[in-house]
Amino acid sequence: MAGTYARKTDLLVIGGGPGGYVAAIRAGQLGVATLLVEKGELGGECLNRGCIPSKALIHASLLYHSVRTEGPEVGVTAEGLRFDLATANRWKSTVVEKERRGVAQLLKSAGVQVLSGEARFTGPTSAELVAPDGGRERIDFRCAIIATGSTPSVIPGFEPDGDRVVTAEQLLNWTVLPKSVLVLGGGVSGCELGEFLARVGVAVTIVELMPQLLPGLDADLSAELRKTLEALGVMLHLGTKASKLARSESGVRLTVETAEGAKELEAEKLFLTIGKRPATADLGLEEAGVQPDGKPGFLARNDRQQTNVPTIFAVGDVARPPMLAHKAYREGVVAAEAVAGRPTRFQHQCIPSVVFTTPELASVGSTSAEATAAGMHPREVRFPFAALGRAHAAHATGGWLKLIGDETTGLVLGVQAAGESVGEFVAEAALAIEMGATVRDLAMTIHPHPTFSETLQEAALLWLGEPFHVARRPPSGARSP
């Protein structure tokens, strides 16, 4: 596209990740002429370098590990079993490519025009597109949506080099597994991919600055994951600060500060995963007049996803935490509907989250401590998977579901769960909270048997003091709203 061109559109969407492509599709459905600009692959970080490829490799490793560890007990054996990274990578790439083609087709069906390149604002209603071949194009728009996502955070002195120090994207494209890996960061990505590596035979050490894995998550969930990682042989250094990194041809040496003093840890590779930062640099935000919200990189916005500049909206990782694809989906819909003049708001009581480890960890709503701080009167119960028929049949009894209800109103306040498939039914708990359901409502909802989702109903019955599958008396003073 050598040369300079100009065009007009009702809506310019910058970024083709979860928030951007959903916004573009919804705008197209509403009859808004929409142009989407993406500098990389459609689907963004989540589809191409995060959520989807990581879950594909995690699935492959779970199959391998399951046959090795629990297979003999349930009658499944295999000779010469091995994990073939090359085949797993081909499977992963097939999944990603299929999903990417699906996104492209959905955008086309909605009438969205997609251009490759980088867009930069030149004003509140204009931008410049630089195409891969260097061609430039002026785009005049009525409204724009910023959906540029985020990039991995970096510590000075620990910068990824693609060889000894890697990001998740680079790890997911390894063609040869190293013998040992240091994981700097015990958050979601560090735990998910650290466990993946440990399952397929890599010696893994996780270093986390905070005193627990998955900082910010319910402490009971973190403790449940810790047991699994330690059983896999993963070395954990919590409450530990990384102070210095040395690289050599054979590996890395990490100096850390612990309560007992300085230590040195060595491995072939270091996986840096200390969080993400919004990708809002080099967008021409000053030229457009868009203001930040006080946190580095994040953009101020109202409940219609509108920034301080009425013509420009922001969704996804650039808009606010949590940095979750499903949150970005909803924000993209709200922004598109606002552009189309629809009455809409980003309004929610809760956002569920899932960590794809073993056990799977899911949470939504408030913890007891959060509910108490908000002036409510929480009471929690825990129902064990060991009392669930499906869990026994699936060789997955090591889990539980914690239900928090309000003593005064009976409302469902929160759910935290650790166990097989909990991410598949946490949305039911989210719906209950959004709809203002009571614990009694959950208890009266007939759940299919045998399923893991029965733990939600069973926990509700336990909270009410009416359990069927555990022998437990109701707490004194327990109510049955």
Image (tube, helix red, strand yellow):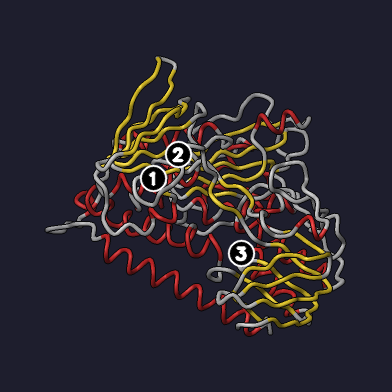
User: Mark 1 and mark 2: span between their CA atoms?
Assistant: 7 Å
Measured as percent of width and height from the top left, residue 322 is found at 64, 47
Q: Secondary structure at mark 3?
A: helix
Rendered image quadrant of residue 264? top left
Q: How many marks?
A: 3
When asked about the image quadrant of residue 140, the answer is bottom right
Q: Identity of the amino acid at label 2?
A: Phe
In this figure, which residue is indicated by the disc labeled 3? 18
For residue 77, above or below residue 336: above
- First of labels 1, 2 by sequence position: 2
Q: Which mark is residue 103?
A: none
Q: Amino acid at mark 3?
A: Pro
Identify which residue is drawn at 53% across, 60% down.
Answer: 46
Q: Is residue 402 left or right of residue 406?
A: left
Q: Considering only vertical position in the picture, is 122 above or below 308?
A: below
Callouts 1 and 3 close, C-beta under 8 Å: no
Horizontal and vertical percent position of residue 465: 61, 35
Nearer to us: label 2 or label 3: 2
Image x and y of residue 423, in percent? 52, 53
Residue hosting label 2: 158
- Front one among 464 and 230: 230
Instruction: List the residue tagged with mark 1.
Output: 165
Between label 1 and label 3, give the one nearer the viewer. Answer: 1
Give the amino acid type for the residue marked by disc 1 in the picture. Answer: Val
